[in-house]
Image: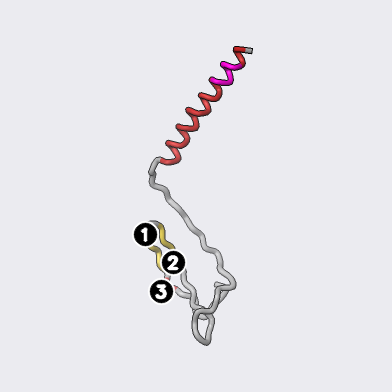
Amino acid sequence: MCRLGKFDILNNMANLISGDLLKKQLMKVQKSLIRLYVIEAFDLSCRDVGSASDPYLKIQLDDKIYNERDNYQMDETNP
């Protein structure tokens, strides 16, 4: 019975150590490549007076902004 108790303590300690290592790896700052595919949008609200919206894509991540305002979709609520 005593050996089982020691075995459980060793397992728990191993899990704690591996958990700490995992946390360190997950929290480490590293460069990553992110690809975002925007396939479609639907049922956008009308923002223009007298016509449908002219939607465009704008994405911001921290201080970087990707703006597609020049490529708007004329009078389209389901681009």
The alpha-carbon separation of the residues under discs 2 and 3 comes to 11 Å
When asked about the image quadrant of residue 52, the answer is: bottom right
Q: Which residue is mark 1?
A: 64
Q: Is residue 19 above or below residue 4?
A: below
Q: Which residue is mark 2?
A: 58
Q: Which residue is mark 3?
A: 70
The residue under label 1 is which amino acid type? Lys
Question: What residue is drawn where x is 54% and y is 79%?
Answer: 46
Q: Name the foreground residue: 50 vs 20.
A: 20
> Is disc 1 in contact with disc 3, using a CB cutoff of under 8 Å?
no
Q: Point out which mark residue 16 bears.
A: none
The residue under label 2 is which amino acid type? Lys
Question: Going by the picture, which residue comes out furthest to the bottom?
Answer: 50
Question: What residue is drawn where x is 58% and y is 17%?
Answer: 7
Point out the tag, 2 or 3, that comes first from the N-terminus: 2
The alpha-carbon separation of the residues under discs 2 and 1 comes to 11 Å
Image quarter (top left, top right, bottom left or bottom right) of the C terminus: bottom right
Q: How many marks?
A: 3
The x, y position of residue 32, in whole percent, is: 42, 48
Question: Going by the picture, which residue comes out furthest to the right?
Answer: 1
Q: Is residue 34 above or below residue 9?
A: below
